[in-house]
Image (cartoon, helix red, strand yellow):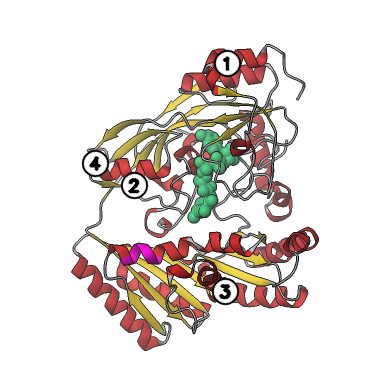
Amino acid sequence: MIAPDPQFLDTLRQIAGPAHVLCEGDLSAYTQDWRKRAQGKALAVVRPASASEVAAIVKACAAASVSLVPQGGNTGLAVGSVPDASGTQVVLSLQRMNAVRALDAANLTLTVEAGCILQSVQEAAEKAGFLFPLSLAAEGSCTLGGNLATNAGGTQVLRYGNARDLCLGLEVVTAQGEIWHGLSGLRKDNTGYDLRNLLIGSEGTLGIITAATLKLFPRPAARLTAWAAVPSMQAAVDLLGLAHQHLGAGLTGFEVMGQFALSLVDKHFAQLRVPLFKDAPWCVLLENSDHESEAHARAQFERLLETALDQGCVSDAVVAENLGQAKALWHIRESIPLAQAEEGLNIKHDISIPVSRIPDFVAQTDALLATEIAGVRLVNFGHLGDGNLHYNVQAPEGSDAKAFLREQEERVNTLVYDAVARFDGSISAEHGVGSLKTDKLPTYKSAVALSLMRAIKQALDPQGTFNPGRVVRL
Ligand code: FAD
């Protein structure tokens, strides 16, 4: 990229309004990532209010050979939403584009702009008597555009699918500054290549999502939550099989949490009162949604847990008595990443493995890390129902965590990712590639897949205007 024309910033001001082109002052909310892994520098942060403003900004950037980093809530965990350190990139913040455009109750769809906060989307659906099921711990600040750009997962994937499964249409600004109006809301459309699914999960490298049409669902009559102590990871997988049999489509969430992960919540947030973890290597959080009644859901849950106790895959369990208790249990699960941050710097892995192979993966990889790097502490938790683990590594107790990361991060990553590859898994289950894993793809993704991905990037964004260096390099 060459230095921008001096008129360039004036052009941006004409498009978005001078108040929405930020160049000075503390811009760290836009330039530093959520985990504080990267501090970039922006030429400007631009905050457009409409798709046509986004299109004009893209054209101006392309004409000036300035690259753009799309940004929603900046809660991404793969360092894909902040500019690099060059000071030559523009951050395109979608946060002002937060309108709910339309609700079509008969079509079960909601059309929202990309900057809508996920929680506001859930609330808009609820107000109209429906459910929008995407749910993750960052829902109070992440945006729908970011959720789609990363194909976010979260805690309800088991039943409703990930962000891709919840989207029926997109409005997108292309690298040429054109607007693709694809907000059809159709459930069937076989007229050629699926552009919507190509754009979803592309992490801002192929187009700017400006609005989306989302699927709505009937609200379940009851949602029940249980917390179970299990004697091993194999027992957790057996419990998952039983839960599928007993709850059928009602099985909505199935989270696993290792004892050390829960001990960090107990240590740093003692007021949350973590149940049953002291005598069990793993705990499981299950959710059952029911369209009949709470009594029906409770009876189903009780039968499941009795069978599991009989078969020895659960050693103890509690079922939440009311919504308040259920929320408190989920709050414990969602506090694990925060407790981990309180404990100090750590190395995160967001991996997926076929569910049936997870017990062997965990046993072998735990043993390997313990042998190779003395004293490492494993903070293992995740969406077991989806085969997705957050297999995180904390520095040895009392050690200098910064130095540990500096000296060991690359080695730990190689040990874990090589193990993931041996088990036919993925090195990014839901957080994406961003900057953190771009250099890992040539090792862990097939050469054919990578060359197809490069061809797509080259075709859609030949100038490299959108989020260059992320996901694939040209
Ligand atoms: P950003 O962080 O702003 O951007 C993420 C990526 O999307 C970047 O590459 C950016 O360039 C691109 N992008 C953003 N908006 C657009 C747009 N409109 N058009 C094109 N590209 C765009 N993720 C999960 O999947 N599951 C979880 O359970 C989960 N839990 C989390 C818990 C915590 C506490 C935190 C902090 C994060 C968690 N995340 C989780 C990660 C993160 O919240 C998700 O990736 C989320 O979808 C990002 O949304 P965002 O609006 O913050 O996007």
The reply to whether discs 3 and 1 touch (Cβ–Cβ < 8 Å) is: no
Residue 288 showing in the rendered view: no
Q: Earlier in the sequence, mark 3 or mark 2?
A: 2
Residue 242 showing in the rendered view: yes
* Label 2: which secondary element: loop
Q: Is mark 1 within 8 Å of ligand 1?
A: no
Residue 260, numbered label: 3
Q: Quadrant of residue 326?
A: bottom left
Q: Which residue is mark 1?
A: 13
Q: Which residue is mark 4?
A: 128
Q: Earlier in the sequence, mark 3 or mark 1?
A: 1
359 up-or-down from 456: above or below: below
Judging depth in this view, the residue of 177 and 331 nearest the camera is: 331
What's the distance in space between the residues labelled 4 and 1, CA to CA? 38 Å
* Residue at the image point whose x is 63% and y is 33% from the top: 26
**In the rendered structure, which amino acid carries the disc numbered 2?**
Phe
Image side of residue 80 versus residue 127, left or right: right
What's the distance in space between the residues labelled 2 and 1, CA to CA? 36 Å
What's the distance in space between the residues labelled 3 and 1, CA to CA? 51 Å
Residue 255: x and y in percent read 45, 66
Residue 132, numbered label: 2
174 up-or-down from 136: above or below: above
The reply to whether discs 4 and 1 touch (Cβ–Cβ < 8 Å) is: no
